[in-house]
Amino acid sequence: MKEEEVNRCQIQEWYPKFKSLSIKTLIHELPQSFVDYLLDDSGPFLLPISVTNEDALPNRIHNPHEDDDYQVAEDSSDESDQPSPAPSFPDLELAVKASIEALGGGVFPKLNWSAPKDASWISTTGTLRCTSFSEIALLLRSSDSLVHDLCHAYDSCADKTSSRPASFVLALRKWYGSLRPEMEFRCFVRKRNLIAISQREVTTFYPALLERKTAIKASIEDFFAENVRERFESENYSFDVYVGGDERVRVVDFNPWCAFTLPLMFTWEELEQSFEEEEEEVEVEMRIVESRREVRPGLKTAVPYDYLDTSAGSGWDQFLRNADQELRRQSSTMSSSEAGA
């Protein structure tokens, strides 16, 4: 993989080409001072001072006694002990505020490649939905996954010349509360051929998907052939789509082939072997979670799921078997109760 392939997957690179086929997004170039703020771990965790008086944690009680640990004794002469002033980014905050209003009042943020999904627990809603610059800063500063964008973007590149891009952007994407997680899919493209489709949300079994699998697969294949294949310049990559109730497909993101991209229901070894160079037509394989036994650990798992043993007799396999047995027991109990009633 080359740096140019990774660069094509930056949202500021691909979004202008697919704007009419994607989620409405407004993009802001980040000042270096804000990038430095995201990377700074030398002192206490300070949220930026808001020039619009918007707090990421509106329900917290500000207690001056809690700041005692950061106060310096009056007779201290060591300037290194002085607490750092809270940062402020007024120009960026005002620009972000205007974009949030333009996008309907709610957005989810991401940098060049990644969104702070691992930090959603810290928000007041437990999601990536943000209504203020302060909430965005809280998510970005709390995310470990964004370290990839900030420090390791090109680590998998054969022609690596740098660890990070020359500039960073903050992409604000319109928040749609009605989107269904089971309708997002990751598509894998090899030698400009769509070879595989995976359900994106692999931690849950959605029975309704079983009935729609064939129709969804056909919609994604048509969408790729008509809108993506000739417009995205890389030969090998993956892209995420959302399929609506009317089978209408929208681009969500583009990702480099292999590297830091999760293969979800596949393995990279399978995907590499599934395409023979001499083949002109490739049968697209689509995988979804077809039973509760097939659910996978999510992105918040301490160990990547590719490293977990899910073979017959393993601990994870036994856990899933027990879960299925419990589900059958509960279903049987409910059926008996309904019959008795």
Image: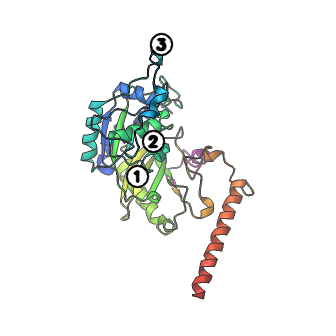
205 is higher (above) or lower (below) than 9:
below
- Within 10 angstroms of label 1, few (less than 14), some, or many (20 or more) residues? many
Local crowd size for mark 2, using a 10 Å CA cut-off: few (<14), some (14–19), many (≥20): many
* Tag 2: amino acid: Pro
Mark 2 or mark 3: whose residue is earlier in sequence: 3
Q: Which residues are magenta?
A: 265-283
- Please determine whether, in this image, residue 157 is positioned above or below residue 14: above
Count of marks, rendered view: 3
> What residue is drawn where x is 47% and y is 59%?
182
Q: Position of residue 318 (x, y in %)?
A: 71, 59
Q: Which mark is residue 78?
A: 3
> Is residue 180 among the parts visible in the rendering?
yes
Q: Which residue is mark 1?
A: 224
Up the image or down, 172 lies above or below 3; here it is below
User: Which amino acid, mark 3?
Assistant: Asp
Q: Secondary structure at mark 2?
A: loop
- SS state under label 3: loop
**Residue found farthest to the bottom:** 340
